[in-house]
Amino acid sequence: MDRKEEQAPRLVTEGPDGRGESLTTKEMRTVTEKGGKDLMSDEIVWQRSISDVNDSILLGIDKPSKTYYIALAFSVLCMAIGIAAWVYMINVGMGVSGLNSPVYWGVFITNFVFWVGIGHAGTLISAILFLFRAKWRNSINRSAEAMTVFAVMTAGLFPLIHVGRVWLAAYWMLPLPNTNNLWVNFRSPLIWDVFAISTYLTVSLLFWYMGLVPDLASIRDRVKGIRRLIYGMMSFGWTGTVRQWHHYEVGYALLAALATPLVLSVHSIVSWDFAMSAQPGWHSTIFPPYFVAGAILSGCAMVYTLVVPFRKMFQLEQFIRKEHLEALIKLTLLTSTIVSYAYSIEFFIAWYSGNEYEWAIFVKRASGPYAFYFWTMVFCNCVFPLAFWSKRIRNNIAVAFVVTVLINVGMWFERYNIIISSLVEDFVPGSWGHYEPSLVEITITVGSFGWFFTWMLIFARFFPLVSMSELKLIMPKPLSGDKLKSLKEGEAHG
Amino acid sequence: MTERLETNVNQVSQSSRSPHYMAAEEVLPEIAEGKDSSSGKKEGEILPVDRRDFMRLFSLSAVAGAASCVRRPAEKAIAYVKQPIDQVPGVATHYASTCGSCPAGCGISVKTREGRPVKLEGNSEHPLNQGGLCALGQAEIQGLYHPERLQSPQFRDGDKWGDVTWDEALAKVIAGVKNAKKVGIFTGGATGHRHEFFEEVLKRLGSSEKELYTWEANSLYSSVSEAYRLSFGHADLPRMELSEAAFIVGVGTDFQVSGLSPVSHSKGFSQGRSVRRGRRNKFVQFESNLTLTGSTADERHVIPAGNESVVALLLVKALYENPASKGTQKFRSDVAATLQAQEAVLLNAYETIGVGRDVFDGIAQELIEKPSIVMAGSGANFDQNATLLQLAAIMANTLSGAFGKTIFFDEGWAKSPVRNGDLVRFEEAGKLDVLFVIDSDPLFSVPQSWKLGDLFSKIPLIVSIQSFPVETDRVAHVVLPGNHNLESWGDEQSIAGFWSMRQPAVRPTKNSRQAEDILLWVLASVEKNLPYQDYRAYLKKKWHAIYELIRPSIAYETFFKAVIRRGFTGKMSIRAANDVKDVQQHFRTLKAPSVGKFVLAAPLDHRLVEGRGAHLPILQEIGDALTSIAWDTWLAVNPHTAKKFGWQRNQLVSVTGPGGSVELAVYPLPGLHPDTVVIPRGNGHEDKRSTISYLNGVNPLTLVEKASDPLSGQPVTSVFPVEIKATGKWFRLAAMQKLVHDMEGRADIIKTMPMKEVLKKATHKRGLDDVPDLFPKLDEESKHRWGMSIDLDRCNGCGACMAACGIENNVPQAGREQILLGREMHWIRLDRYFRGDLNNPQVSVQPVMCQHCNHAPCEGVCPVYATTHDPEGLNAMTYNRCVGTRYCANACPYKVRRFNWWTHRWGEMGERLQDRNPRATNPDVTVRTKGVMEKCSFCLQRITDAKHNAKGQNREVRDGEVQTACQQTCPMNAIVFGNLKDPTSRVAQLRDDGRAYLMLGGAPEHDHFGLKTLPNVSYLAEVTLEEGTQEEHGHHG
C-alpha cells in the first residue's frame, strides 16, 4: 500500500458514507446475515443519520449547558468534603470511623466492593457484548467504559482509605524490592486484589482509550489552536486509513478477548476477600459467581442510572435510543434473577450444612438487628426488578430509572449486609458487638460519589459520550432523495 | 421468654440511646492533635472541626502523612559515669516489698528498670499470696505515676486552694500543733507498726493514744474480729486454710475477691480444686446477689438479701441436730439456748429463704464428714447483723469441727487491721484541736448520713496527708502530698508473728514525703522529738523485738538487710486456746431482715473496693466480669423482676433509699434474688480529685440512713429497703459484652464435664493435636512449642490477669467513650456466659486471649506479613510492618486482636488525664501507635528473657521458668504456661488431660474438629458435681 493511500481523505469526518464499506462493517454485516436479524439495530427507526452523528454528539463538547456546570460544581464540592474528611481521618486515626472490635470492616469496604461491582458493566458491555456482536451496545459502550474506569479508580481508593497506615500501605502492598528482603504475602486475598484490580484498571483503560482514538481524531479535525494540538497528540495521528482501521479492529477484538475473563476474575477475587476467611456467612464457595452476578446487576443498573441523565444533559436522545435502554434493562432483569437465585441458594446451603455458626448468621441477617438492611437488599435487588417483566415498565424511562437507582441502593446494602452481619455476631458470643457508620465514613462515601461524578463530568466535557465511530456502524446510511423526504414528512406528521 | 426480653432490651439500647450519645462527636476523637480539647463543640456540625480547622486540614492534605507524626516528650539519655552496683541498664532489678492496696498485706516484688518501677508481681516466696496479686495490687503502678497526684502542699482558703511550699505548709501545721491540747489521727487499716507509731506520736504530743482512729471501709475486718472477740476474747481474725477444706459453705461471702485476704484465700481455694490431684472441693454458696465467688460455686442457693444470719443460724441448727456434730457440752448447750431464743425467727425461715430443711441437713452432714469450713460475710451484707452472722459462722465451724483443721485462731491467727468501734468513738470524742487524716477517705467511704463533714468542720486544723487526693481533702485546711506505697517504708503483720517488710522501690516521684516522716518533723519542730531520724530508723528499732522472737544466728544488721531483701520473715505465734464463750445474749440484737419491695445490697466492688481504686484507669477499664460494665455504676436486678416492672437494660431509674436517692441505669443480671437489687460501691466521686473517677457512676452510700451494727459499731452500708422508679430516660452503660443466654446452642466454646466422667477419663483417647487435616506438619526442628492451659473450673473472673497484662504489655486504656463504641484494648478478656435458670444460672467465666493457632486464620490473610508464625508456635505480630488492613482481626474467629484506632497519647484519655506515663511503660514491649494491630504475644519478652538466662547458664529453659504476666498473677492458679514439646511439662500434661479441649475445636470424640485452627491454648472443662444438670459433654449441635 503506498503512502498516498494511507493519507487518503479523512474519511471519518469528511464523507458521510466515507467509511461505509470498511472491513468491519462488512464483517459485521456478514455476521448479522448469518446469525439472523440483529433485532436491536434493525428494528430501531432512526431519526438521525450518520451525517448528524458528529455534529450532535460533539455539541456538548463545544458548548456545555448550564446544568453541566451546576452538576460539576456540586460533584467537586462533594469530593472536596470527602477529601477533607479523609485527611482528617489520616491525621487523627481510624477511630473517627464507626469501626470497632469486632466490626473491623464497614462502610469503606462496602464502598470498595460496590464500586468494583459498578466497574463491571463497562467491560461486560464493551467486551463481552462486542464478542457476541450485540450491536445495541454501540450506543452506550463509551459511557459504560468510562464509568468502568472511573468506578475502578474510585474503588481503588477505598482500600487505601480503609487501612490504618495509608502512608505505608500505599507501597508496602506492592511487591517492591527492599533491603529487608520482605516480599508481600501472596497467600493474602488482599494482594490478589491489588493485582486483580490493577490489571483490570489497566486493561479497561486501554480498551476504553483505544475505542476513543478515532473519535479523538474527529474532534481534532473540528477544533483549532492548542486544543487541536492536544487532541492531535491524543489521537496518535489517526487518519482513518484502511490499514489503521484494520489494526484497530484486530487490536480491539484482541483486547476484548483479553478483557472478557477479567470481568469474571476481578469480582471473583474480590469475593475471595470474604470467602477465604473462616468467618461464618463469608466462607462459602458460592461467593465468586454470586459476586460476579451481583456486580453485573449493579453495573447495568448504574449504566442506566448514568446514561439517562447524561443523555438528557447532552441531548443524545436520538443516538441512545430507548430500544438500547430497554436492552440494558433486560440484561438487568436477567442478572437480578441470578442474584435472587444466589441469595436463596446461599440460605439453603447455610441450613443444609448443619453448621450452627453459619446458620445463626443467616437467621440473624433476616431477623436480627440488621434485618432492615437485609430486606432492603431483597426488595431492591429481587423484588422491584420483577417489574421489568412488563414491557411497558421497561420502556417507561422514569420508572425504570427509579428502579435502577433502587437496585444500586440494594446492591450497596447487599455488601453492607454481607460485611456487617457476619462480623457483628460471629463465633464467640463474648466478643459480639455492634456497628453504626460514623459521620466521617458517610462523608467519605459521599465524597467518593463526588470524585466519581467529577471524573465522569470532566470526561463528558472533553470526550464524546457516545462512540461516534461505532455508532455509525449501526445507524442507517445517509438517506437520499425520496426516502429522506418521506421520513421527514413522517416525522412532521408524527 | 427470657430470650425475648433480652432481645427487647438490646433493641431498645440500639434505638433509643441516652442523650449522652446522641451527639455525633462522641464518635469522633477529642485527641486531635493541636486541638483544644476543652473547646465546646456544637451539635450538628458535619465534622467536629470549625471552619479554620477545616481549612487547615484541607490544605494539609498534601502533607497528611508527615502531619500524623506524634511529638513525644523529649527525654535525655545520660550514661552512668559511675554505675551503681545494682543497676545494669536493660536488666531489671526486683525489690521485695509489701502491697498497700488493702490491709491483707500481700508480698510483692517490684520490677524496676533503670531505677523506675514498671511492674508489680506477687512475691512467689511469700506464704500469704504465693506469687499471686489481685487487680488492685497490679494497678498500684498506675497510682505511683498518676499525673493527678499533688505536686506540692496546698492550703485551703475558703473554697479556694493554693499551692504552697513545704516550709509554709509545715509552718502552719506546727503553729496549729504547738498550741493544741488534743491532737488526733484518723487513718486507714494497717497490721504493722504504723498504728503503734501513730500512738507514740500522739502520746508525745501530749494527746492520748486513744485519739488514734482507724477506719477501714471493708467492715468485714471489724465484724469478724468483733465476733472472735466475743467468742474467744481476742479481737483478731482467724487464719483460714482453704486448701485443706474439701467442703466449703459460703453464706453471702465473696472471699475470693473482696474478703479478708482475697489472694491468699483464692490460692487456698484453687489448691483445693485440683482435679488432677484427685482433690476437688465442693463449694455451696448462699447469696442474694451474684458474686464472682458465687460464680465458682457448685451449688448456689439464692436467698433474699439480709437473711444471711438466718441462713447461718439454720446451718447451726442443722449441725446441732446432727448427732455427729462436735463441740463441748457447755458450748452445745449455749448453742441450744441461742437457737431456742431465736425460734421465732427460724420458724418460717425455710420458706422465707426458699431453701428446704433437707438441704441444710445434707450440708450439715457433709460439713461434719469432710474437712470443711463455713465462710460468711462480704460487702453485700454490712448490715445490723453483720457481727451476728460471724458469730453464727463461728458456731457452725465449731460444731463441724473446723477449728484446728481449716480455721486457726490460736496458731498463726490473722491480725485485724482496725480497732473496732473507732468510728463511733470518733463521733463521740470531744473537740479535737488538730486532726491528721492519713491515707484514709472517710468523707467518701462513710455514709453521708453520718455527717462526718459537720464533725470535721468543727476542728480548727485538719491536715490531710494522702498519697493521692481524696474527697476528705475538701474539709482539710492543709493538704500534704504523702508518699505512695512504693515510695514508703513500712511493714505489715497480717498473720501473728509473721512480718512483711515494705521498702521504697523508687525515690519519691513527686514532691511528696512519707506521712510518718512528716509527723517526726512536726514533733521535732515543736521540740517534742522522738529519737528517730526517720520512719526507717523507727522500724529498725522496733524490729529488734522480731529479731529476738526469731533468734536467727546472724547479727541484727544482717538480719534486717536480709529481711528487706527477702521481704518477709516470721515465726508462727501460738497461744493457749480459749473455750468458746456464750454469745447467746448478743443475738437479742438480731434484727429481722429488711422488708420492702426491693432490698438493696451495696457490695464493695472487687476492683475499686469502696473507691480507692477509682482513680486508676486500668481498674475502671477492666470492668466487672459478670456484667462486663466498665467505668459506670449499674443497678443489677433479676431479669424476671425487670420484666415484671417493665425496666430494660440501660433504662435510667431513680433509686430512693432512706438517706437519699440516686439515678442510674438498670442492668438485668441473672442469678439475683427477685427482690434484691445491687449497686456496687466504688464510683460516684463528685469531687474532682481525679478526672478518671470524676462523675463516673453513683455512690450507693448516699441512700443509706445512719445506722450501725450494734456489736462492731460499723456503719450499715448494705441491705436496706429502697424504692425504684423509672425516669423514662436512658443511659447506655459501658458494657463490653452482650448478654447472651445459653450460648445460643454453641457447644465448643465453654465445655462442662460431670465429675464422674472426669474420674473415668484421665486422658483423651486421641490427643488434641491429632486433627486430620491437609496442613503441613508442625515444625519439628524447634525445641519449644509454647502453649497455655486455662482451667475454667478455677477461673472466677477477678480480672487480675487483665490488669497484669495491661501493665506488662503497655496496653492502653481506651476510656468509657471508646468502650461504648466497642474499642476496648484488652489483650485478654473475660467472656462470661450464663446457662439455665435465669434465677440461678450456671455462670462461666472464660479468659480469652490470642489462642496462638498453629493453623492461624489471621496469618494467611495479612498482605504484608505483619503477622506470621514463629517456629516456636507463637503467632507473632510485627508492629512495624503492619499497615492496618484489619483483615487478620476479621479472620480471627476468637476476635482477640485489637486495633489502635488512635495513638493513645501519653497522659491523656479523651478529656481525662491518664497516667500513661512513659516512665510507667515496660521498656521491653513496643508501644503501638495508631493504625497498628496488636494482640497477646504470650509475653514474648519474658520467653526471650528466660531463653537468654538459660543460654547464659548453658542449659534448657526449665518448665515453669517462663511465666506469662496473666499466669504469674492469677490468684486462682487457673493459667499454666510452658513448652508443649516437653512431655513432662505441666502444660503438656494438662493438654492431654481428659478435660482439655480447644476452643471452637468441635467435639473430637465425635470426629468433629470444628475450625481446625489448632490453638496452642487449651481449656480445661468446668467440672459439674450435680447429677442430671450437666449437658452432655461434647454434644455438638
Image (cartoon, coloured by chain):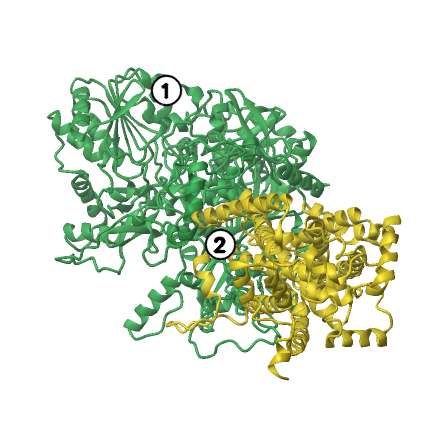
Q: Chain of mark 1?
A: B
Residue wearing tag 1: B453
State the mark number for residue B898: 2
Vertical order, B189 against A6 (above or below):
above
- The amino acid pointed to by label 2 is Arg
- Chain painted in yellow in the figure: A
| x and y percentages locating residue A381 in the rendered image | 75, 53
Instruction: Determine the CA span between mark 2 and mark 1.
Output: 45 Å
Q: Residue A74 is drawn in which quadrant?
A: top right
Left or right of residue B577, residue B347 in this image: right
**The N terminus of chain B: image quadrant:** top right
Above-or-below relation of B633 to B788:
above
Quick one: SS at disc 2?
A: strand
- The crowding category of the residue bearing disc 1, from other C-alpha atoms within 10 Å (few below 14, some 14 to 19, many at least 20), is some
Q: Viewed as shown, does residue A478 lie left or right of B1025? A: right
Rendered hue of chain B is green
Quarter-of-image position of residue A255? bottom right
